[in-house]
Every structure is written in C-alpha cells, then in structure tokens.
Image (cartoon, rainbow, N blue to C red):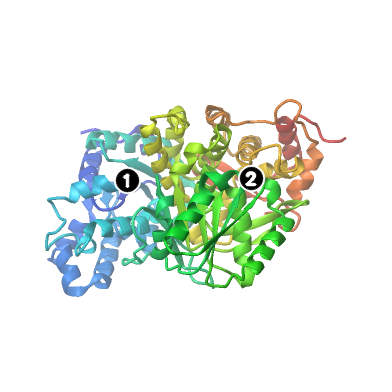
Amino acid sequence: MTRPPDSLKRIAALKRIVLIGFSATGKSAVAPALAASLGWRALDLDVLIEERDGRSVPDIFAQDGEHAFRAIEREAVRAGAAEAGVVIAAGGGAWLDAESRGLLADGGFVVALEARLDTILARHTGAELGRPDARPLLAGADSVARVQLLKARRQPFYALADATVHTDETAVGAVVEEIRQALDRNAARALASRSRLHGMVEGPGVASTAPPDFGADVACTVDVGGDGSVAAYPVYCRWGLLARLPALLDAVGLRGRVFVISDETVRGLYAEPVVAGLRESGRPASLRAVPPGETSKSLEQLERLYAWLAEERAERDDTVLALGGGVVTDLAGTVAATYLRGMPLVHVPTTLLGMVDAAIGGKVAVDLPAGKNLVGAFYQPRAVVADVATLATLPSRELRAGYAEVIKHAFIRDAAMLDELERDAETLLAINDAGADAARERAVALIARNMAIKAAVVSVDEREGDLRMILNYGHTIGHAIEAVTGYGRFRHGEAVAIGLMGAARIAERVGLIDSAIVERHRRILQRFGLPIAMPDGDAVPVDALLEAILSDKKVVEGQSRWVLLESVGSPVVREDVPEAVVREVLGELVGAPARA
C-alpha cells in the first residue's frame, strides 16, 4: 500500500481530503482508490447516512422530505469531520450547507470533481435516470433539464474548492494521481491561508434545491440575496446563443421592449442581426451604438443615451440589452441602473473580458478624468448571455487582452487552471483559426469555469466589502496606467497584465512570495502575448501613476489597499506596502523614474 507523500506528512493540520462535486462525477469511485494510495480510509457520506438511518437515501427523501434528509446529512458531516486520515466522498448537495463547508474544510483539503453534462448524463443512463429509486433530486419528468439546472445552481459552490480535477475521459488511477499532485503542490498553502476558510464558510449562501427553470446552457447562477436587486440570475455560456436571445429573454421573465446598446464595431457584426431577430420574434427593439473604446465610458455618452431613451419613451418594464465588450457593459449597465431609477438589464458580452469579468457581478460605471470607474453603481442584470461564437471575430489583440482576466482568476483562485493556461496557451489562442473545433470546445469550458469563479465570489460579496476585493488583483496599477495614458493606449487586459506583474514584484519585495512565482507570472503572461511592462517609448512619470493610484476607488482614508499573493490561490489585502517599494516597482514597469 502506498504511503502519503512526504510533503503531506509535514502538514500537521491536514486531517482529511474531501471530494465534492455533482452526482456522477466520480466521488464514490475515486475516494477508495485515493485512500488506498495514501494508506488512509475512505468514507462515503451517503453510505454513512444509510447505515445510520437504516433506509436508503431515496427512501429518506420520499418518506421524510429533503429538509429532514439535510438534517441527517449534517450529522453525517459532523461525524466524518471528526475523523482523521480519511478521504470523504460528500454527497452532491452536502457542500451547499455553510456549516458543513466549515466542518469539512477546517483541516481538510477540498477537491472538486468536475465532468461535462454529457458525461454525467451518460453515467446516469441505464443506471438511475427513469428508475423509481433514482437519486431524489434527479427523479421526475425531464431529468436531463433537471441535471443541467441543478448543476448550474451549484457550480459557484464547487468553485470554492482548493483544487478541481476533471474526470470525463480520465481513468480513476489518473484522477488519483492528479489529486496527489495537487496535494503535494497546494495542501500546505491552502491549510495555512488566513482567508480560505472564511471564504468557504461564507460562500455564495445556501442554494435552493429547486432552482428556477432558466432553460438550457446555464453555466452557473449568481445569487446575491435580496436588497432591492435581483436575487438570482443565470449566466448562459455556449457557442451560438445569439439566435436564441428572444427565448432566453422569455426564460427570465422579460416581456417589454428591448433597447440594445452596442458600439460601432459590433453594430454590423451582431447588434443589427440581434435587433432583427428580436423584431421577427414579435418583440419591439431599438438600437443605439456608441464609438468603440474606453473614451465612451463618459458622462457625455451617458447623457446622450438618457436622451435617446427619453425620446423613445422607455418604460420601467422595458429592457436595456448591453451588446459588446466591457465598455458597453459598463456604460449600458450604468444607464439601466439609473434611468427611471432602474430598468431590467441583460448583458450580452462579445469579448472574452466581458464574458469572464465585466458582465458578471453587477459593477457598472463610467470614468472621470480623475480616474476609472468613479461614477457608477452595483446593479445586477437579469441574465448574462455569453455566445462564445462572437469571439471568432475578435481581433487577436483583444482576445489576448481578455486572457489577462482569466490568468488573474487562476492566480487568485485556481492553481489547476493556471497549470492548464501555462500548458495550453497555444490551443486556447487558436479559437479564431479555421476548423479549430477542439480549441473552441476548450474555450467554452474554460470560460464557464471562470464564470463560476466570478459568480462564487460576487455571490458572497456583492459590494466589494471583503472577499470581492481579491478580484482587483493587478487592477490597482492597471487602472492607474489606463488613467495616465488617457484610456486609449492600452487595452484594459494589457494594463491589467502589467499590473499583475507589478503586484507580483511588490509581493516579492515585501516577503510574501518567492522569485519562482514572480517568474511564473512573467512566463504565463508572455505565453499569451501580454505585456509585462510598458513598451519602450511609452514611459510615463511614476508620480503621475502614484497620483492615479491614490484616486482609485479602493483607497480608504488615503491609504492604498493592495491585493497581493501569499502563494498561488491565496490572495491577501494589504494596506502596509511601503511607498518606496511601490515607487521602485512602478519605475521598473513604466521606465520613467519618479521626481527627486
């Protein structure tokens, strides 16, 4: 029997490994194999429940209801969490309970097993679907839709895991090896993190076991709770969704006129066909396009759009549909949040940046000369519709810039994704190539994972009070570069890439990370063709950048708040970074020293 890796023996805090994930992702098969490889015991929570109660899980559901089952399940979690040297296979819904997450993650390394919808359905076919004793939440009419809806609802919870391993075409032994590698690489960091357990316990809240039917192709849902905003909304992700927009608007209960806001670049490619499709479906629709680029995120453009809606006599039940990249998302979102004190909003991002970042979470804003995103609101959309096919017409520079946000997500949240980005950069950049079906399939899966990460964070912290701050990794310097250069010289993702490099160097200078992680930033950013410093000839004064940083919305009482890494997947917020360190790093990035 194989013994645990030597690195794990040195982690006194590690008591258990917890496998989470949707039904049929392989938890029950992987747990005993992993336990055997480590010389530990396997514990299946569903088996423990049935042994303790004397009834099968379906019988408990049928006779006592789900509420009673969840109470029994929590007792099983408590019993399992009291054990040491075990690999626990958790039920698909156990991880949704905040108390259970805390018990399992405290001293436990959490691994999410992930599988595509077609894989899950294939594993259920002939085994459970259609049987009277099928898993209770999958039984009933239209089980395929039920699986899809439940999985989408739970995906933000699974995204809280310390590592994610895909099991679709992977043998159990290979899955075990991937988990062992993740343990060796990340277990010490995870259990030593000061913020990890807090984030897991807080989580996105408790998900409903009977989510609303938003239809097919939901990658995840965002659930921010009720404070006057929409409590939950779907995030759709698939190739070819634009043609289904009328049906998707129906699925989220939007019935009025549609006011499409786009930019001149996207107008002919997608906006005009979308408006035509809406009209053909019998839904009145109008279009207004703004000039492309960050300069359109202005009070002047905001006023022009208000005037257009007033001329059209827009009403509160009509919908603002933002069709474009991050600029359109922010501008149209601000319009929807403020005109008539709020109109329904739907984001239809056409850039990678928009899909994985700008469209999810409800942050909408316009710029002022003094800084980026200084005027805006937190205003949640009613839906996000990401048609990945729109990326096929995206210029190479825009696609590469969008990957900066993906790289950011990987550094702050998902070490396995970081490995994938480093390994498969060439494939992921080939989405525009003719016949690149494999690249496009990979892109859809990667974008959906990033959407789930963002959904998990914003669901627990809608208004950037604590956890959501980590999404600003690389943005303090990136926003300053954009402001000082007039929002026109760099794409947002390019500025963020330079900011990521700067944040890594600052973290090294203050003793949080070593040079290997800094070098990994450089290597991955360059693999995606992203800048790690301002090009020669584009130098700007460091003092101008420092002034822009102090105008950033994250400044509190005149003190800059820096999102830095303690290690991959373990971000922290620091307010004690010496100005001398910031000056030194900025000088290296922008090539112009500060004034004496």
> Circle 1 sits on which residue?
114
Q: Position of residue 421 (x, y in %)?
A: 46, 33
Image-based side of 71 in relation to 391, left or right: left
> Circle 2 sits on which residue?
475
Quarter of the picture containing the N terminus is top left
Q: Position of residue 275 (x, y in %)?
A: 50, 55
Image-based side of 81 in relation to 526, left or right: left
- Residue drawn at x 59%, y 49% is 326
Q: What's the amino acid at mark 1?
A: Glu
Say which quarter of the image contains residue 310.
Answer: bottom right
Q: Position of residue 336 (x, y in %)?
A: 59, 64
- Residue drawn at x 16%, y 50% is 125
Q: What mark, if any, has residue 506 been given in the picture?
A: none
Q: Is residue 232 visible?
A: yes
**Secondary element at tag 2:** helix
Image-based side of 591 in relation to 305, left or right: right
- Nearer to me, 125 or 464: 125
Q: Is residue 26 visible?
A: no
